[in-house]
Image: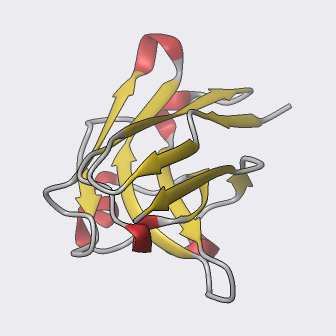
Amino acid sequence: EVQLVESGGGLVQAGGSLRLSCAASGFTFDDYAIGWFRQAPGKEREGVSSISGSDGSTYYTDSVKGRFTISSDNAKNTVYLQMNSLKPEDTAVYYCAAGGIPPLAVVAGPPLIYEYHYWGQGTQVTVSS
């Protein structure tokens, strides 16, 4: 059974940091890309970053570039999202998801919902001003 479990969310002041974790099981990690998505109240879910499990290629949307860092520990089947310089507009439920996406597609653009087939339950991130 495929499972993705996010952790690390919480309440932080603007300018602070959080590290989200996504623990994956039930599939061959190297064959998949892991994407981080977020959904703020009243807004559509958007992809913010992704990483290829095979070669570590990454992508960041402009809104998080330079502040967020995605990384993976393939031995632990875990992907991390280090979030620094957090802003109130980063407040959202953050989801990780897995999809069979090749590295060239990972770097080509933002993670897209329809490309990712397995999803975690989400973790709340709240940034206070």
Viewer-nearest residue: 37 or 102: 37
Which residue reaches farthest left? 66
Residue 111, visible in the rendered structure: no
User: Residue 14: x and y, percent?
Assistant: 34, 57
Q: Is residue 5 above or below residue 45?
A: above
Residue 18, visible in the rendered structure: yes
Which quadrant is the N terminus positioned in?
top right
Viewer-nearest residue: 49 or 8: 8
Residue name at image x 61 percent, y 62 percent: 116
Residue name at image x 55 percent, y 57 percent: 126
Q: Is residue 63 left or right of residue 98?
A: left
Tally the marks.
0
User: Residue 79: x and y, percent?
Assistant: 45, 32
User: Residue 66: x and y, percent?
Assistant: 13, 57
Which residue reaches farthest front? 129
Q: Is residue 118 above or below residue 90?
A: above
